[in-house]
Image (cartoon, grey):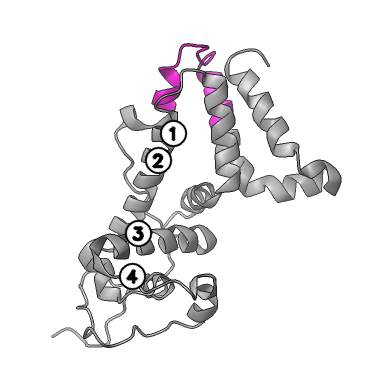
């Protein structure tokens, strides 16, 4: 017989949701992690629960890596743990959903663009403003025990969208490799690189725009 004290992260079992009126048990430090959303109403219904869970999963996974407990994500999203299993799935399904939605969102932003330079410029500025997925990719790449989640169909990825652009098109695969290295690495290493090069504070405000402009020229062979 299974022990009633089974770990929340033992994904072989599916713990049932607590009674509707019971509040989820708080993990250590969960209240401080949720302070930014203290005024937000508790999610109700499938869509609200999924949205809250995916938002907090993206944040916590990027901050703490793929081994963050599901209970911590449930606490941050202010939902019962069982609702994650019901509306999203186990830990591997949650990680896969976070990654796939990010890839699809990135591809959707490029859907109506035909200028590879403009597209890359937007990609760099977007990933810098919202670095969570870049950080999560770094965690996954460095953690040999983490299962890398399956991504969306290759035809739906941002790289495929860039290759379809014609006015102007990307110069080639080498340029694309450089672009994606910058887009995914810059948000993670930005602070350390600026410090290493002793870039003064008054020049840091415009550095992202300058880098985005440079990459836009590089991807089209003008750099």
Q: Residue at x 36, y 74 (%)?
A: 42
Which span is picked out in magenta?
A: 159-180
* Labels 2 & 1 near each other (Cβ < 8 A): yes
Q: What separation in Å lies between label 4 and label 2 (alpha carbons)?
A: 23 Å
Q: Which residue is mark 3?
A: 51
Can see residue 200?
Answer: no
Q: Which residue is mark 4?
A: 43
Taking the magenta stretch, the answer to whether it contains residue 19 is no
Q: How many marks?
A: 4
Quadrant of the image containing the C terminus? top right
Q: Which residue is mark 1?
A: 109
Q: Which mark is residue 105?
A: 2
Q: Is residue 106 above or below residue 2?
A: above
Taking the magenta stretch, the answer to whether it contains residue 172 is yes
Q: What separation in Å lies between label 2 and label 1 (alpha carbons)?
A: 6 Å
Q: Residue lying farthest left? A: 1
* Labels 4 & 2 near each other (Cβ < 8 A): no
Image position of 16 (left or right of 157): left
Residue 193 rendering spot, x and y as whole percentages: 74, 45
Q: Earlier in the sequence, mark 1 or mark 3?
A: 3
């Amino acid at each position: 017989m299974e022990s009633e004290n089974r770990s929340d992260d033992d994904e072989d079992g599916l713990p049932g949701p607590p009674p509707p009126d019971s509040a989820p048990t708080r993990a250590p430090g969960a209240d401080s992690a949720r302070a930014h959303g203290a005024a937000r109403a508790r999610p109700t219904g499938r869509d609200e629960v999924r949205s809250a869970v995916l938002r907090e999963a993206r944040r916590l996974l990027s901050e703490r890596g793929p081994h963050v407990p599901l209970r911590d994500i449930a606490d941050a999203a202010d939902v019962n743990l069982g609702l994650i299993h019901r509306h999203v799935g186990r830990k591997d399904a949650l990680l896969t959903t976070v990654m796939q939605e990010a890839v699809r969102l990135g591809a959707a932003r490029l859907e109506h663009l035909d200028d590879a330079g403009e597209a890359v410029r937007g990609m760099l500025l977007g990933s810098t403003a919202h670095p969570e997925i870049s950080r999560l990719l770094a965690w996954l790449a460095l953690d040999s025990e983490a299962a890398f989640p399956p991504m969306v169909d290759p035809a739906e990825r941002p790289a495929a969208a860039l290759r379809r652009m014609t006015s102007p098109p990307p110069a080639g695969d080498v340029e694309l490799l450089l672009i994606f290295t910058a887009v995914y690495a810059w948000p993670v290493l930005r602070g350390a690189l600026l410090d290493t090069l002793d870039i003064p504070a008054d020049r840091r405000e415009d550095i992202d725009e300058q880098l985005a402009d440079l990459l836009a020229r590089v991807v089209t062979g003008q750099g």
